[in-house]
Image (tube, coloured by chain):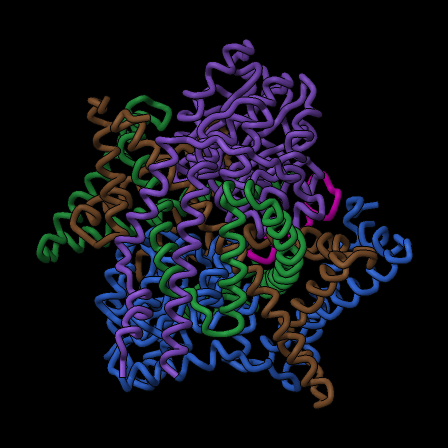
Chain colours: A brown, B green, C purple, D blue
Amino acid sequence: MISTDPSIWVMAFFTIAITSLAFRDNPLAKFAEHTFLAAQAGNLITMAWRNIRSIGLQPLMKGSMTMLIPLLFGVALYTRYSKRYIWVSRYPTAMMVGIGTGVTVRAFVEFQFIQQIIDTFKPLNSFNNIFFVATVVICLTYFIYSLTPKSPALEKPMSYVTRLGRYLMMIAFGASMANTVITRVGQYAGRIMFLLYDWLGLG
Amino acid sequence: MSTKLVRKTVPLIITFLVGLLMIGQWFLKIPSLNELATSVQQWGIIIAAFAMGLGSVNIIIRNVHRIQKREGTDWLYAIWLLAIFFLFAIVGIGFGSASSQYRYIFNTILQPLSATMYPATLFFLVSAIYRTFKTRTVEGGLFVIVGAIILVANAPVMAATFPFLVSVKSWIMDVELTAAYRAILLGIGLGAIMLGFRVIFGLETTHLGREEET
Amino acid sequence: MASKQDGVWIKLQHIPREILYLLIIISMIVPLLRPMGLPITISPQTRSLFDSLNTLEPADVMLEFVDWSAGSMSFHQPGCIAVSFQAVKRGAKLVFLSTSTEGPLMYELMLEKFQSVFDEADYVYGEDYVYLGYVAGEETARAAIASDIRTAFSSDYYGTSLDEIPLMQRVHNYADYSMIISYTMGSPESFVRQFNTQYGVITHIHCGEMMTPTILPFWASGQITGLLNGGVGAAEMEVLVKRPGDAVKLTDVYSFSNILVFVFLIIGNIGFIMQRRKGE
Amino acid sequence: MIIASGKVVDFIALILIWAVAAVFVWIVGGKRFTIRRMVAIDVIEEAVGRAVETEKAVVMNIGGGGLLRGEYAPATMAGLTVLGYVAGLTARLGADLIAPMYSDGGVETIPVATELIRDAYMAEGEVERFDAEEMIPFLPVQASVMALADRVRPAANIMVGYYWHESCIWAEAFGRIGAIQVGGTTNLYQIPFFAGACDYVLIGEEVYPISAYISKDPKLIATIVGQDAFKWIAAILIILGTILVSFGNQWLTQFLSM
């Protein structure tokens, strides 16, 4: 039985309007997209304010004065919009880039370099293992830009190795592309479920 | 000279000290260092919260311009955009995001839009697959052939009727793809470590914008 | 001289995209109205998550990062429900929290469907499960949560200070987390870095199928313990916990749509190859 | 011991990697080294030339990763470098440049990009052709890309930066109207779309040496050489470890996880 709840109808309208985006750009789609952009920005402001209040302002009110530093740095971000004081916004940017780079890079050595190398030590007793180790080394040579052997004798075979590396990676990209189809289908099927079950009351 | 110190050098020093502090927390077992690093991370959270507002200020400025210019129906969209933005911001900050009022406008407006906006990429993906992914070169050929195999293997009905597809797919994913992606990940990891070196030691300053000629 | 036959190959490559889109939508509607219910094979990645959940003891605390947005609700919500059901069956304490902006509202939509399970197991808010809300900063916030949760949250989502919540009185940092699971479409690697690589916390990930290949190397090396492969993984998990729901319905949709997209890929390329062969 | 257990080798490795980078940057220098040919970057100059002949524009986008988050900043910085290079070319050769920026992702990049383009046009003495409003449209990610592609119908579309789901939309929108496409991102699960749809693709960290390749600055080339050195080390370690493990010797595995 078709739904009589007005908010379900609004939700169905937005679902169809955004889907029409892919067919042809039309005023309904533009209206829905503007609504989305605005609502998303409004949600960001709401969530940002919760954090600023509960982690920054409330402890400050309770007397931990060190909270002044991040709060002032946060406000300083907005000097970006004034021609004269734009340089002030460099302080919070510098701090955020410092924290962001430090937090990420510190883990990369172990997470994405050493532990990955250790796990590539595979006993060469099966075709899969030999193929695995060979693929990792061959694809790795594709990413070498300057320390490549210059002597003509080695240059030719090296170019074949890097081309083979590129082929091996393109096989992997083909498989990933197919996996993306199944993800988007699964996501969009959720909207079809909403339209069929909640809106039209079928199934 | 002091303006160059204040405008450029001090921010670089901040990045340097804060970057090394994060790395120190990771590798060194020094409790006081760990507490300092954790509180600096808390500062990072607060500044990130402020940075989330930058997008909104940008939207407000851009759309106020659009309203002033009054081109065709464009400015009506801008008015509607600002109305919805302030509706969410005021209800969100006023009543709080846990309130039933905010939950109502979120579930009626933002939830269906966000739930359809990203999945709608499916249609662009389908037309890209049909129109753009062609066997122009050997690489394109490999891309298309393996893509086709995995597409079929991902369909449960085909996997059920042709069990060998499941083993072909698991070989491609667990051996070929894992090895190729491991090499790419090693490269990205090393690249990020090197860029981390240039950022923390002040060699890379794109994020700080232009050199002032003061 | 473009013979009539040439026209076929060119026409084959210029089917209007609207027809493709309508076919895809129909290929999703049919199975949802007439479910087929095909056998679901369990992948080793899902099996390792299920086995890890079964090591949970009643007092253990599991962090669940409700980090999906409405876009991936169709498979993240069933996955979270299946995993949380198994954790509740084991009697584990659940701390839900979010580092993505739509997380809080996604948690409340999930709770509407999961409240019955909490009631059946006599789970009381504040003693057996809690929701801490959203914290900004992405990887920085995850690093802070790992080293000391109180730097990221001073109160729960509903405003109660952490020290007044019985469950949170004994949850401070990585040492108190038996395992974490992140339902995310953003950066699963950042969870692995800040929890597993740094403190050795057991880390599970539920992300979209398109992201699974990029983190398979980390599952292969053991840095990720359980890995749910999007909607396919959520359906496998629902089968393992014997609670088939929305995710199992999705698997029927996958069959038709994947085959259809396969046909589009083949048609497009046959037209291209034949036209080029005719062109020479 | 002050270094956390299980992190000794990692700590030494990080110091070693940075020390080698420092040695190359400040002592050895990059003068004696060159970067191998990067076809995807060389083709940009041809593409801009073609844009001038056919009186079409050149579109360049640097994704929505922004500069503030450690994981996305590297790709955005590479994108900004290519943006500066392309702006220099369009200024010198006289093509029109359109650099759309996201209005809802990585907005802190917008002023940086605007300055970069203005500097490039100023350096070529074409500052009067620089019009921020026209050249740098803001757009939310989705539909406006299709409208932009149909309206502008550029000769070339260059996408280097951090991309999420929108990579497929950009590649499809501009691929459909036949623009030469160059794509590069470090977001691994978006590379397949650039690999499938673009004429030239930069795979993963292939975007990092762009700045060194374009500017030929010895300091930047030096860090790339340092990086290459460690890729050879990684390859040698893998081969060594595999041989050892094949004979049942776990020595290297234990050493590296110390």
Residue C21: % across, % down: 30, 50
Quarter occupied by the N terminus of chain D: top right
Residue B176 quadrant: bottom right
Residue B159 or residue D85, whichever sits in front = B159
User: How many numbered discs?
Assistant: 0
Residue B139 or residue D161, whichever sits in front = B139
Which residue is found at the position 55% from the left and 68% from the top?
D208
Residue B200: % across, % down: 59, 60
* Residue D33 appears in the rendering: yes
Residue C99 or residue C162, whichever sits in front = C99
Which residue is found at the position 53% from the left and 73% from the top?
B138
Q: Is residue A192 magenta?
A: no
Residue A189 quadrant: top left
Residue D118 quadrant: bottom left
Q: Is residue D134 left or right of residue C280?
A: left
Magenta residues, start to end: B15-32
Q: Is residue B26 magenta?
A: yes
Query: Can you name the residue that lies furthest to the bottom here?
Result: A152
Q: Main SS type for the magenta part?
A: helix
- Vertical position of residue D75 compared to residue B157: above or below: below
Which residue is found at the position 71% from the left and 25% from the top?
C55
* Residue B5 appears in the rendering: no
Q: Is residue B26 left or right of residue A66?
A: right
- Vertical position of residue C13 compared to residue C200: above or below: below
Residue B166: % across, % down: 60, 46
